Amino acid sequence: MELRSVVPPENIFKSDHPFRQLLSRMTHREATIDVVLRKGLSDDDKRRYDAEEYRYRQFFGDRHITFYSDGVKDFVGKLLVNA
């Protein structure tokens, strides 16, 4: 059985500390975490994307994380095609 956790696209790192602790503790160590972000074309967008990716990796530690950079619409489309 595959455990999967999808992180919402909004920035969880601006949330309050108790929520972040709850999310970290309640995510099973062997879960596959899908992080859906939107990588823009400008240099600023690319820097923001890289910073967000770094924060998610720091936050979830050694868990398996897959990043999707084409936004929610494309992510959901891929899920439907593979269903």
Image (tube, rainbow, N blue to C red):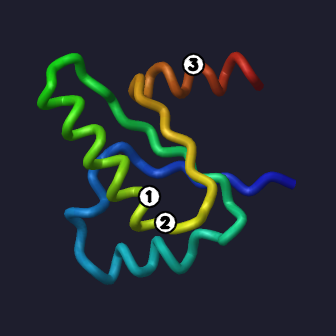
In this view of the protein, which residue sits in the foreground, 40 or 79? 40
Q: Nearer the viewer, mark 1 or mark 3?
A: 1
Q: Is residue 22 above or below residue 6?
A: below
For the point 51% across and 68% down, which residue is it?
Answer: 61
Measure the alpha-carbon separation of dots 1 and 3: 25 Å
Left or right for 53, reference 41: right
Pointer 3: residues within 10 angstroms few (<14), some, or many (20+)? few
Image quadrant in which you'd find residue 70: top left
The amino acid on which the numbered mark 1 sits, given as a three-letter code, is Arg
Q: Is residue 21 above or below residue 48?
A: below
Dot 3: element: helix
Measure the alpha-carbon separation of dots 2 and 3: 25 Å
- Residue bearing mark 3: 77
Q: Are marks 1 and 3 in contact (CB under 8 Å)?
A: no
In this view of the protein, which residue sits in the foreground, 2 or 64? 64
Image quadrant in which you'd find residue 29: bottom right
For the point 49% across and 66% down, which residue is it?
Answer: 60
Dot 1: element: helix
Left or right for 55, reference 30: left
Task: Locate residue 46, reporting x and y percent.
Answer: 23, 30
Mark 3 or mark 1, which is nearer the start of the sequence? 1
Left or right for 42, reference 74: left
For the point 68% across and 60% down, which residue is it?
Answer: 31
- Residue bearing mark 1: 57
Pointer 1: residues within 10 angstroms few (<14), some, or many (20+)? some
- Residue bearing mark 2: 60
The amino acid on which the numbered mark 3 sits, given as a three-letter code, is Gly
